[in-house]
Amino acid sequence: MNIDHLEAFVYVNHFESFRKAADALFLSQPSVSARIQSLERELNTKLFLRKGKQFHLTEQGKNFLPYAEEILKSYQNGKKQLHVPNEKDQVTIGSNLLMAQYYLPYLLPYLSNCYPNVTFKTMTTTNDSMLEAILNQQVEFGLMKHTSHPGVDSFKLLDNQIHLIVPPEHELLSIEKPTIEDISRYPIVFYQCGSFDWAMIHKIFEALPETPNIGFHTDNLEVAKELIRHGKVGFLPELSVMKELREGTLMKKKLNMLSVSHQISLVSLKGTKSVFTDRVKAIYQQFNRSLMLA
């Protein structure tokens, strides 16, 4: 029995979509369909009933599903056990850009103190590429946006809240409940990042009769922070300004009309055990508090 065929079957059922399963497996949709058809021929039974673009599991498919999931889990565990890090090993930790810049510099020294004989290596990439690296066991774990991919386990580390960020002693800090009209009177730095739901930030300005004063667009967080230090205001993820908030060089203003956050998770290959992931899970709340993130 081909493990790739089982994987396609499990993924299509999980995502309830051949297209989404194909995207998750980095395959074409016809390739996923062909794998399932091969599995059906091997089992001599139909696993899905199809009617146009609609499909659902047959009774045989429902009965076979838990066995397919268990086979995949055992296979992944077996692959993991072929390489167990020892105390002198190199461990690769993956992360998206935001976590690499603003979380890993604090986490890595902690892990290094816990495991002084281990060399830690980092891989910074997009969330999609990180998922592929985890599935291919190129990294021990990844710090990235939450995913429901069936091949991985996701453990919530933090909710990265979006706040209005202003310089110290800015006039908005003296207003107990600033309105959108209050904010719109000041030049706004708009940080452009596809990883967050910035459309929701745009949406809170829609009721205004005039377009808000967005004076600067940037895709660089450090540029955005420097502009805000010099008197502008902007909406930034809390993780990116934790150092400045501790030092008092930037301030955050919570707004009742804004509730945007991005869940960051520790993502690892499904069913695997690791002393490093267990360590991070054990201390994440205390660690986040030390960074003013909890």
Image (spheres, helix red, strand yellow):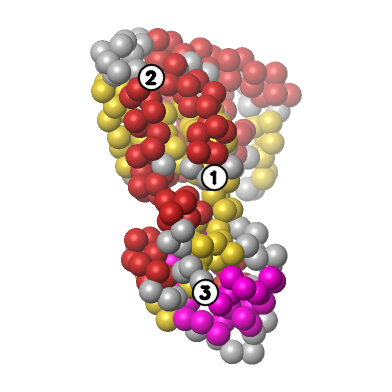
* Residue toward you, 146 or 275: 275
Disc sitting over residue 273 in the figure: none
Amino acid type assigned to the residue bearing label 2 in the image: Cys
User: Looking at the image, which residue is at 47% across and 51% down?
Assistant: 246
Q: Are marks 2 and 3 in contact (CB under 8 Å)?
A: no
Nearer-N-terminus badge (2/3): 2
Pointer 1 local density, CA inside 10 Å: few below 14, some 14–19, many at least 20? some
User: Looking at the image, which residue is at 53% across and 45% down?
Assistant: 292
Quick check: is 178 in the magenta stretch? yes
Query: In this orientation, does residue 26 appear?
Result: no
Pointer 3 local density, CA inside 10 Å: few below 14, some 14–19, many at least 20? some
Label 3 sits on residue? 170
Q: Is residue 81 left or right of residue 184?
A: left
* Residue toward you, 213 or 137: 213
Amino acid type assigned to the residue bearing label 3 in the image: His
Q: Which residues are magenta?
A: 171-199
- Residue 236: horizontal and vertical position, in percent? 49, 61
User: Looking at the image, which residue is at 64% across and 48% down?
Assistant: 52
- Mark toward the viewer: 2 or 3: 3
- Residue 260: horizontal and vertical position, in percent? 61, 58
Label 2 sits on residue? 114
Quick check: is 50 in the magenta stretch? no
Label 1 sits on residue? 293
How far separated are the C-alphas under marks 2 and 3? 42 Å
Pointer 2 local density, CA inside 10 Å: few below 14, some 14–19, many at least 20? few
Q: Quick one: SS at disc 1? A: loop
Q: Quick one: SS at disc 2? A: helix
